[in-house]
Amino acid sequence: MPDRDVPAVPRFLPYGRQQIGDADIKAVVEALCSDWLTTGPRVAQFENAFARFCGAAHGVAVNSGTAALHAAMRGIGVGPGDEVIVPALTFAASANAAVYEGATPVFADVEADTLLIDPKSVAARITPRTKAIVAVDYAGQPADYDALRAAAPGLPIVADACHAPGATYNGRKVGTLADISCFSFHPVKHLTTCEGGMCLTENAEMAAHMRRFRNHGIDSDHRARDAAGTFAYDMVELGYNYRLPDVQCALGMAQLLRLPEWLLARRAVAAAYAKAFAEVPHATPLAQREGREHAYHLYVVRLAPKIDRGAAFRRLRGHGIGVNVHYGPVHLMTFYRERGYGPGLCPVAEEAAEHILTLPMFPAMSRSDVARVVEAVAELD
Ligand SMILES: Cc1ncc(COP(=O)(O)O)c(C=O)c1O
């Protein structure tokens, strides 16, 4: 963490922020000047580089984290009549992906101190129709994958790892813990391709299926057709155009080189916050479990019940501190309420959602940025 007095962003301190440098710009310009703006060689290069970073066998690049989750549903074979268990406290896309494929999300509760999906709640929600579990590595801490496997024997697990590239669970890397792991490269995430995402898997067949799915369900790509000397192709299932262009893959590759350094910077910011908040009884950071190395996409504190969270949000925003709330429970969103979900389904998530606050967390934060946030939160009492 830079030990300087000048804040990284003097006026407004957002909760997350991308970092774009000369190497990123050069990589993008080179791609723009190449023969391939999309469907070219940089796609596989980025897939391989990111898969290698995470220790996974196969990467399938797509144009958002949402598309990655949708592709994962198709890769697992989720369809109409199936149920998919999803934590209640996540971004809506974690659940929407099941709906895209005609399946029914079943919301599981979260653990009160980590806000990670609660394996006991998962076990209680399994039915003969359960087709898959979506585990969200909330804020950047891996879910308890061993407990989830034990709770749901034989059921495929999709990791919504959009918050957690670079995190580990008992020495194993996020990206290798689930049947398919999904990542987002939105600018607030660890590395960005503007919009973008990727699925990682050890399963070559699932990877091939998701690759076809991101390209309209067409059974060959232009390289295969060129090699075979044919123009003919078949569309064997309904897919989408979820392709990630080469220009964006070039940015992703340049960003990836800096990810190890950025992870260290995020962990340094988290350590500084943890030390400071030990002295602030009305703002408690989320718990961290033994054996899990956190990637710190988000830094979330739980405010004491006596603090009015709405007033706190407005006051901190008034100080130029871009606090946020991740998330309102998905089952309480209008779309889901209109489909029969409602309050009381996931009481731990519903209670937590009233008191959590996301504080600024990004690699370029300085010590004085952290001090400014802590001081403003301490004054809320
Ligand atoms: C947990 C989680 N899942 C899915 C997504 C969707 O990713 P994207 O915005 O790249 O579609 C996000 C991004 O905000 C996320 O935080």
Image (cartoon, grey):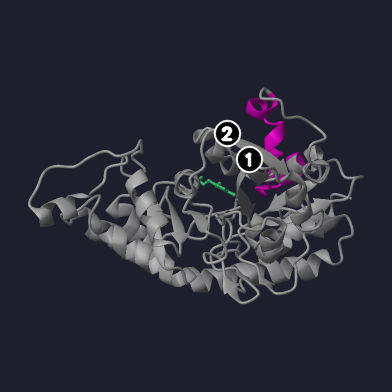
Instruction: Please check the rendered image and state whether residue 175 is part of the magenta-colored stretch, yes or no.
Output: no
When the figure is inspected, residue 176 is found, relative to residue 151, above or below; the finding is: below
Q: Are marks 1 and 2 in contact (CB under 8 Å)?
A: yes
When the figure is inspected, residue 82 is found, relative to residue 246, above or below; the finding is: above
Question: Is residue 164 visible from the viewing direction of this image?
Answer: yes
When the figure is inspected, residue 289 is found, relative to residue 67, above or below; the finding is: below
Residue 307 image position (x, y, % from top left): 88, 45
Q: Residue at x 52, y 42 (%)?
A: 78
Q: Nearer the viewer, residue 96 or 324?
A: 96
Q: Amino acid at mark 2?
A: Gly
Residue pointed to by mark 2: 81
Question: Which numbered marker is on residue 129?
Answer: 1
Q: Is residue 224 left or right of residue 262?
A: left
Q: Residues within 10 Å of mark 1 (few under 14, many from 20)?
A: few
Q: Which residues are magenta?
A: 314-337
Q: Nearer the viewer, residue 334 or 312?
A: 334
Instruction: Please check the rendered image and state whether residue 334 is part of the magenta-colored stretch, yes or no.
Output: yes
Question: Is residue 376 visible from the viewing direction of this image?
Answer: no
Q: Is the residue marked 1 within 8 Å of ligand 1, measured from its CB? A: no
Q: Residues within 10 Å of mark 2 (few under 14, many from 20)?
A: few
Whole-angstrom CA distance, mark 1 to mark 2, is: 7 Å
Q: Earlier in the sequence, mark 1 or mark 2?
A: 2
